[in-house]
Image (cartoon, rainbow, N blue to C red):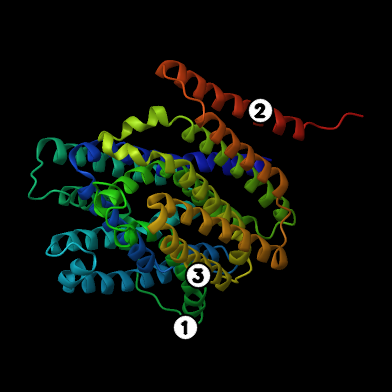
């Protein structure tokens, strides 16, 4: 349990560097939904979805490759860092120049014709994010979560402050959503100062033996990440294309995308828990891989992860009567019924990340590509079939189907190549109980808001208490 407690502690610290900043960023939703109409907010949703996909290409899976090869006996961590950073910089520089030179046709393809300035700002955001990704990964490997958290917190503080200033005190309709991107560029530029020592200590490096091996290891990870981003962002880039005209009476498809994008923000609570866990768990898994009890350890880690995700699912889904006020524009709230589905989808994505440990530790990263490619097929087919008949509810179910199928496939393959005794039955029981509680509680209508809030918070606390008692009883030593 000592190592699990240490992992939990590091997850909390990384949470300060990922959950807290992203939560503070989430607090911008009321400001954005008050200033922008759903059509404009749909533009922000769509452009940042594209940026997330391109960022995955720029980093090229080198974070995972860095963890893998920097922890291998006999390898020099600094040399591995230089090799990985060389690849990321080369790809990012070439990619950014390409985006700047082709800004006009790219704006047309992104369905924001004439807005080449959007492409310039996004290019700067993606470039900065890419070149600082490995220095931040290095902080994780060197067990410096406090420093990692400090960098992320300062960045988001700058970002929130700039958004408030631009949108409340300097806003002009002529620039519109450009203010959001300009704020991101300025805030992200701080990262360059924060990791300046790592950046200036980098030296272009190539090793005829190690570089090809790292590249071979990394590119399936990149393709897997690209497929994963496609699965996550696809609905936000195609909803306004595949939604039939007039599906939502009196609303355009751009309006529907804005509503979907705003409601999708609530699923960020699950995403952030997963992200904080990954930041701590990736180096933990690699460093523990050679221990003889590692399979049992990985199983317990996944079990506790599922429990935390179930608490988040229940806590957020049945308290939407409180959280709905984060959306200042009432027209954005009409899509809140999709939030539980998106949270459940995020949970299965996190479970998939846990299950994916086996192909990273056995150097079979190409299996990740195959699984993620299968997820892309499910995503595209499900969105194509469900959007015309169910709108953004169909997009939500498409995400759930995708991540559920990926988790199942990864588990079945993993048990063949790297068996881990996951507690599937107990985990499934917790997940099913969470779904039943969310459905049952949301059927109860309480008109008094204070009574409703008390009831919902009480159910959440009761659920947590029951889980605690079950887990405590499970781990009590047997009496003679």
Q: Disc 3 designates what residue?
A: 373
Q: Position of residue 275 (x, y in %)?
A: 47, 49
Quadrant for the C terminus, please. Answer: top right
Element under disc 1 = loop
| The disc label shown at residue 9, or none | none
Residues at marks 1 and 2 touching, judged by CB atoms closer than 8 Å: no
Residue at image coords 30%, 60%: 51
- Using the rendered image of the protein, determine whether residue 480 is visible from the camera's viewpoint: yes
Residues at marks 3 and 2 touching, judged by CB atoms closer than 8 Å: no
Q: Position of residue 95 (x, y in %)?
A: 28, 72
Nearest the eye: 434 or 306 = 434
* Badge 1 density bin: few <14, some 14–19, many ≥20, Cα 10 Å: few
| The disc label shown at residue 208, or none | 1
Mark earlier in primary sequence (1, 2): 1
Seen in the image, is 91 located left or right of residue 33? right
Mark earlier in primary sequence (3, 2): 3
Quadrant for the N terminus, please. Answer: top right
Nearest the eye: 425 or 273 = 425
Distance of mark 1 from mark 2, alpha carbons? Answer: 57 Å
User: Is 219 located above or below residue 192 in the figure?
Assistant: below
Q: Position of residue 207 (x, y in %)?
A: 45, 79
Residue at image coords 19%, 63%: 119
- Using the rendered image of the protein, determine whether residue 423 is visible from the camera's viewpoint: no
- Image quadrant where residue 475 sits: top right
Q: Disc 2 designates what residue?
A: 466
Distance of mark 3 from mark 2, alpha carbons? Answer: 39 Å
Mark earlier in primary sequence (3, 1): 1
């Amino acid at each position: 349990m000592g190592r699990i407690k240490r992992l939990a502690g590091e997850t909390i610290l990384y949470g300060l560097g990922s959950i807290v900043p992203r939560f503070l960023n989430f607090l911008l939703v009321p400001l954005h939904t008050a200033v922008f109409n759903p059509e404009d907010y749909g533009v922000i949703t769509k452009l940042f979805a594209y940026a997330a996909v391109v960022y995955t290409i720029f980093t090229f899976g080198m974070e995972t490759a860095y963890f893998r090869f920097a922890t291998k006996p006999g390898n020099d961590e600094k040399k591995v860092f230089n090799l990985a950073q060389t690849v990321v910089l080369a790809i990012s520089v070439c990619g950014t120049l390409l985006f700047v030179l082709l800004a006009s046709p790219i704006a047309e393809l992104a369905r924001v014709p004439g807005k080449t300035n959007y492409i310039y700002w996004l290019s700067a955001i993606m470039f900065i994010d890419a070149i600082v990704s490995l220095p931040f990964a290095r902080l994780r490997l060197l067990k410096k979560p406090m420093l990692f958290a400090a960098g992320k917190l300062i960045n988001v503080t700058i970002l929130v402050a700039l958004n408030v200033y631009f949108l409340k005190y300097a806003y002009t309709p002529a620039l519109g959503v450009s203010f959001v991107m300009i704020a991101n560029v300025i805030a992200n530029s701080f990262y360059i100062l924060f990791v300046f020592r790592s950046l200036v200590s980098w030296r272009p490096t190539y090793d005829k033996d190690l570089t090809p091996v790292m590249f071979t290891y990394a590119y399936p990870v990149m393709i897997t990440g690209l497929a994963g981003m496609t699965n996550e962002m696809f609905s936000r880039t195609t909803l306004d294309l595949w939604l039939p005209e007039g599906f939502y009476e009196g609303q355009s498809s751009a309006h529907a995308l804005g509503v979907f994008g705003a409601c999708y923000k609530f699923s960020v609570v699950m995403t952030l828990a997963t992200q904080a866990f990954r930041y701590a768990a990736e180096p933990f898994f690699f460093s523990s891989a050679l221990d003889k009890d590692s399979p049992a350890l990985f199983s317990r880690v996944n079990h506790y992860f599922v429990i935390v995700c179930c608490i988040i699912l229940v806590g957020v889904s049945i308290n939407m009567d409180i959280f709905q006020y984060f959306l200042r524009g009432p027209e954005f709230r009409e899509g809140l019924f999709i939030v539980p589905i998106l949270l459940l989808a995020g949970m299965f994505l996190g479970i998939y990340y846990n299950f994916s440990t086996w192909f990273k530790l056995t150097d079979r990263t190409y299996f990740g590509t195959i699984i993620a490619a299968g997820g892309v097929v499910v995503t595209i087919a499900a969105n194509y079939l469900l959007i015309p008949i169910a709108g953004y509810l169909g997009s939500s179910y498409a995400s759930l189907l995708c991540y559920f199928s990926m988790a199942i496939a990864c588990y079945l393959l993993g048990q063949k190549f790297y068996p881990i005794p996951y507690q599937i039955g107990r985990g499934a029981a917790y997940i099913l109980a969470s779904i039943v509680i969310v459905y049952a509680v949301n059927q109860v209508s309480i008109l008094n808001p204070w009574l409703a809030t008390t009831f919902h918070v009480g159910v959440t606390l009761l659920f947590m208490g029951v889980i605690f008692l079950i887990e405590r009883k499970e781990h009590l030593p047997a009496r003679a």
